Image: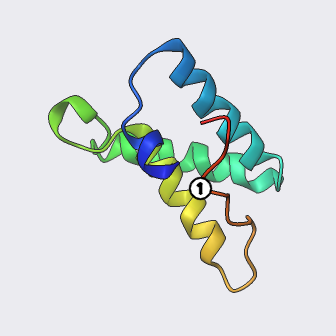
Amino acid sequence: MVCELMYLGRSEESAHKIANLLKSVCAFDHRIKTLFIATRIWTEVCSILEAEDGKLPPIAFSLMVIHFLQQLEKPLLPIIDIYMESW
């Protein structure tokens, strides 16, 4: 799933899948949405957010946040099954 998300096109269907994933993740803890927003602002300020310029797309940074939150000593997020039927 992670690889698929990183290379999703800009179609409306892809946008819905990404939005649903992020909404599901944010439902685990109210602080996660704030962390996503802070990460997005940080990437924009540092000019490291533009897939067209050979930089990482926005979803890549969200996935890094998700991974980080799964690897904590007391994880805030569970590991997501990589073979979800809906994908």
Please tell me which residue lies in front, 12 or 4.
4
The three-letter code of the residue at mark 1 reads Ile
Q: Identify the image quadrant of the C terminus.
A: top right
| Above or below, 67 relative to 82 | below
Disc 1 crowd, CA 10 A, few/some/many (<14, 14-19, 20+): few
Residue 21 left/right relative to 10:
right
- Given residues 82 and 65, the one toward you in this image is 82
The image quadrant of residue 73 is: bottom right
Identity of the residue drawn at 58% across and 33% down? 18
- Which residue, as the protein is rendered here, is positioned at the far bottom? 73
Residue 74 locus on image (x, y percent): 75, 82
Horizontally, is 5 left or right of 70 in the view? left
Kindly indicate the quadrant of the structure image that contains residue 68: bottom right
Which residue is depicted at the point 41% across and 31% down?
A: 8
Can you name the residue that lies furthest to the left here?
Answer: 53
Residue beneath the point at 64% across and 67% down: 69
Q: From the viewer's perspective, tell me whether residue 82 is left or right of residue 85.
A: left
Q: Looking at the image, which is closer to me, 18 or 30?
A: 18
The residue located at (73%, 49%) in the rendering is: 25
Residue 46, image x, y percentages: 30, 47
Q: Circle 1 sits on which residue?
A: 82
When the figure is inspected, residue 3 is found, relative to residue 58, above or below; the finding is: below
Number of on-image labels: 1
Residue 61 x/y as whole percent = 45, 50
Element marked by disc 1: loop
Q: How far across and down, in percent of the image, does residue 14 sit?
A: 52, 24
Q: How is the image coloured?
A: rainbow
